[in-house]
């Protein structure tokens, strides 16, 4: 399989981990050689309920037996998508009420950017250095990492960048700004949380100048930080919410949410302001519904904060300079990318899946399924610390 994987499937980097997958269950992934790996990454924060969650799997199977794709997004009333949007609205603060379902996180970002322009009639966007909001042209335009975007220029014009947590920069949001897009916790940048009411202050400035505050919850959302959405930790409500990843219990999905008044601008004058064939797909929406029910009807969110405490208690080692993040969106920081690489690769060989962050080479990603058990956390951390002892002896 590996030969064909490299030959026929387009690659994203010269050095993929290239594990050959057999199956996955709970907190474990199994390769075709029969090896078992404890998953501390959860498909990069997507499989929040672990692998093959029973409720999600049953919802998918039940829906498949009724109907799958029948029409493009928005034409027919379909139970899974309608129920999902309704339940989501019940869990969101005013005025976030109407959800547009799309197929991925980056498409949700695109929709949010379009909506901000449509609502304000303005063109400028503001984003943050080291921000990540997806990889299509609009999302790439608001990505704050020049090295990986310059070869794709020209991108959309009129985008300015500020520094996350820099209060003075907030003044750069003006009456020319259509929207500012922010992650509630910066992911690719190194799991950086807002400090000193940064989000709240950005919110106030947006209200003052009439700019849309777009919050990207694609990674922190759906319980990962102990609340359903990260912004709830920072006392701030966006005008447009962007979601994805953990939303689908492992299925591909995204959405943007706004007030009824704002969202309704997308369907007229011109009509079809945003369209998609597969958005709201019944099978995917059924998975989303089961996921949201599971996250909100169980103790998972509260347990996430207890599990964070356990990780923080266990992750003490001379190679770890700091543990960043919130809930089960954690990053163990080391002194150098070399140390981080060595630890991740050695852990992988020993059966523990860890991963990198997009723009911060010293971070070791720890974003396990929210369903991970305390015992699994203890076992994984024990292995990680053993590997760190080995790596420390290398004096990298
Ligand atoms: C914060 C954030 N925004 C947007 C995206 C893009 O989502 P997708 O890969 O589903 O397009 C990601 C994915 O990593 C993300 O973490």
Image (cartoon, rainbow, N blue to C red):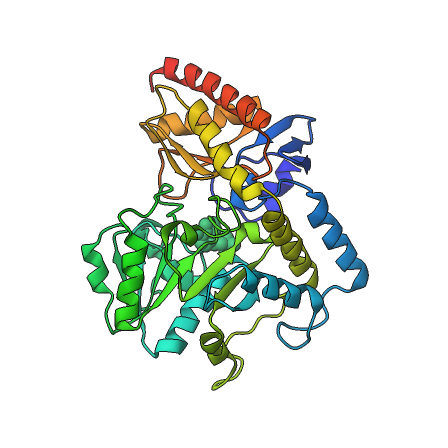
Between 222 and 320, the residue placed more toward the observer is: 222
- Taking the spot 65% from the left edge, 77% from the top edge, the residue there is 75
Quadrant showing the N terminus: top right
Report the side of 293 relative to 268 (left or right): right
- Outermost residue to the right: 65
Q: Position of residue 371 (x, y in %)?
A: 60, 38
Between 225 and 32, the residue placed more toward the observer is: 225
| Quadrant in which residue 391 is drawn | top left
- Taking the spot 57% from the left edge, 44% from the top edge, the residue there is 48
| Quadrant in which residue 390 is drawn | top left
Between 303 and 183, the residue placed more toward the observer is: 303
Q: Position of residue 219 (x, y in %)?
A: 47, 49
Quadrant showing the C terminus: top left
User: Is residue 152 placed above or below 294 in the rendered structure?
Assistant: below
User: Is residue 36 placed above or below 217 in the rendered structure?
Assistant: above
Q: Is residue 249 visible?
A: no
- Outermost residue to the top: 393
């Amino acid at each position: 399989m590996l030969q064909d994987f490299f030959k026929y499937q387009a690659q994203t980097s010269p050095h993929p981990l290239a594990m050959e997958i057999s199956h996955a269950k709970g907190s474990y992934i199994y390769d075709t050689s029969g090896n078992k790996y404890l998953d501390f990454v959860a498909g990069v924060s997507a499989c929040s309920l672990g692998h093959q969650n029973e409720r999600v799997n049953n919802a998918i199977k039940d829906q498949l037996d009724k109907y799958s794709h029948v029409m493009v997004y928005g034409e027919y009333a379909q139970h899974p998508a309608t129920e999902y949007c309704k339940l989501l609205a019940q869990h969101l603060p005013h005025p976030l009420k109407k959800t547009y379902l799309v197929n991925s996180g980056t498409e949700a970002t695109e929709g949010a950017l379009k909506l901000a322009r449509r609502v304000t009639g303005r063109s400028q966007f503001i984003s943050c250095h080291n921000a990540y909001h997806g990889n299509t042209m609009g999302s790439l335009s608001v990505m704050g990492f020049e090295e990986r975007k310059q070869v794709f220029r020209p991108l959309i014009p009129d985008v300015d960048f500020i520094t996350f947590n820099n209060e003075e920069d907030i003044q750069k949001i003006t009456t020319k700004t259509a929207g500012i897009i922010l992650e509630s916790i910066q992911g690719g940048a190194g799991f950086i949380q807002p400090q000193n009411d940064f989000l709240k202050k950005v919110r106030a400035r947006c209200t003052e100048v009439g700019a849309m505050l777009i919050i990207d919850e694609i990674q922190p959302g759906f319980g990962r930080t102990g609340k359903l959405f990260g912004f709830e930790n920072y006392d701030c409500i966006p005008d447009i919410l962007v979601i994805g990843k953990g939303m689908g219990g492992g299925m591909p999905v995204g959405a943007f949410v706004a007030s009824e008044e704002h969202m309704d601008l997308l369907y007229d004058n011109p009509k079809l302001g945003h369209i998609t064939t597969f958005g709201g797909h019944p099978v995917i929406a059924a998975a989303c519904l089961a996921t949201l029910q599971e996250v909100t009807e169980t103790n998972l969110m509260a347990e996430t904060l207890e599990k964070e405490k356990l990780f923080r208690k266990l992750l003490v080692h001379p190679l770890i300079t700091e543990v960043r993040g919130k809930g089960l969106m954690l990053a163990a920081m080391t002194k150098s990318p070399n140390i981080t690489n060595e630890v991740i690769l050695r852990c992988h060989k020993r059966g523990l899946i860890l991963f990198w962050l997009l723009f911060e080479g010293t971070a070791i990603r720890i974003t396990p399924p929210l369903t991970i058990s305390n015992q699994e956390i203890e076992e994984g951390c024990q292995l990680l610390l053993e590997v760190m002892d080995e790596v420390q002896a290398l004096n990298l």
